[in-house]
Image (cartoon, rainbow, N blue to C red):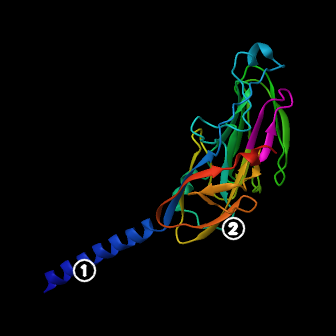
């Protein structure tokens, strides 16, 4: 009888543990999609540098304000959670203080579009052989605007969230431009060269409001999903996260909004 009781207890513990793990796994969902330019892909204009030509003239420089691949994939589109005090998955604690790098490299900012959390330090670098100026037009955080000598780097503390991406420019090399988004939680993404994005481990069962923004369009208002108008207002939409995969598929972007 004693052995039977112990075996029964052990089985109950295993079942309970397994159930607990299953519930934990069901707490989170991942949001994916692909931003697609719904028209003929525009050709990026080439940039002819007029400063430090002996260095910058060696690099292929193009206008990066609208980057579209041959399949319509639209790069550098920001998407982020707007809902306040959202529950954050425990796994994000490991990267909460991870340094984010904005590099002045090959006479352009790399990356062109960057997102970070308020808990992360920003490392502004200059990998070029001459000086750059990094001018960040932040709104909530204190703007910074300083010379970054060749081969140097500087840490910047951005402890407040910004509502939209801030413009980063170089006053010495006026063609250089980038965008920086600072958020209070890790639920953001910037689309890659193929237009795809992924936001991992969002709280399942929760309706969240997301914002979509691109530098030429500003708030992305004109979009369709599955052949239907997405009906986004000011670039915002609400979506209830389900456990596991949440794939929005191709999000087609009306070209007219990029002519502003």
The residues tagged by marks 2 and 1 sit, at their Cα atoms, a distance apart of 43 Å
Give the quadrant of residue 112.
top right
Viewed as shown, does residue 71 lie left or right of 257? Answer: left
Q: Are marks 2 and 1 in contact (CB under 8 Å)?
A: no
Q: Looking at the image, which residue is at 39% across and 72% down?
A: 20
User: Can see residue 177?
Assistant: yes
Give the quadrant of residue 60.
top right
Using the image, determine if residue 153 lies above or below residue 130. below
Residues rendered magenta in the picture = 166-179
Determine the secondary structure under disc 2: loop
Determine the secondary structure under disc 1: helix
Residue 55 percent across, percent down from the top left: 74, 16
133 or 110: which is nearer to us? 110
Residue 93 percent across, percent down from the top left: 56, 56
Front position among marks 2 and 1: 2
Dot 2 crowding, Cα within 10 Å, few <14, some 14–19, many 20+: few
79 or 25: which is nearer to us? 79
Q: Which residue is mark 2?
A: 84
Viewed as shown, does residue 71 lie left or right of 174? Answer: left
- The quarter of the rendered structure image containing the N terminus is bottom left
User: Magenta segment: does it hold 27?
Assistant: no
Viewed as shown, does residue 105 lie left or right of 135? Answer: left
Dot 1 crowding, Cα within 10 Å, few <14, some 14–19, many 20+: few
Give the quadrant of residue 125.
top right
Q: Which residue is mark 1?
A: 9
Which is nearer the N-term, disc 2 or disc 1?
Answer: 1
199 or 144: which is nearer to us? 199
């Amino acid at each position: 009888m004693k052995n039977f009781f112990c075996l029964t207890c052990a089985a109950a513990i295993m079942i309970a543990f397994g159930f607990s793990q299953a519930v934990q796994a069901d707490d989170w969902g991942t949001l994916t999609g692909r931003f697609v330019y719904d028209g003929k892909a525009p050709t990026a204009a080439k940039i002819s540098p007029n400063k430090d030509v002996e260095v910058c003239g060696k690099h292929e420089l193009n206008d990066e304000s609208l980057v579209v691949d041959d399949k319509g994939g639209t790069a550098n589109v920001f998407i982020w959670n707007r809902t306040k005090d959202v529950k954050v998955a425990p796994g994000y604690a490991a990267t909460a203080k991870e340094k984010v790098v904005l590099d002045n490299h090959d006479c352009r900012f790399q990356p062109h579009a960057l997102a970070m959390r308020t808990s992360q330090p920003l490392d502004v670098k200059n990998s070029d052989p001459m000086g750059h100026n990094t001018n960040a037009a932040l709104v909530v955080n204190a703007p910074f605007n300083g010379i970054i000598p060749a081969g140097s780097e500087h840490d910047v503390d951005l402890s407040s969230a910004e509502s939209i991406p801030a413009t980063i420019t170089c006053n010495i090399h006026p063609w250089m431009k980038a965008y920086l988004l600072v958020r209070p939680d890790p639920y953001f993404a910037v689309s890659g060269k193929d237009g795809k994005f992924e936001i991992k481990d969002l709280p399942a069962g929760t309706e969240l409001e997301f914002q979509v923004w691109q530098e030429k369009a500003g708030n992305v208002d004109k979009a369709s999903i599955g052949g239907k108008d997405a009906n986004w207002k000011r670039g915002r939409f609400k979506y209830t996260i389900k456990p596991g995969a949440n794939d929005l598929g191709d999000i087609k972007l009306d070209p007219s909004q990029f002519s502003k």
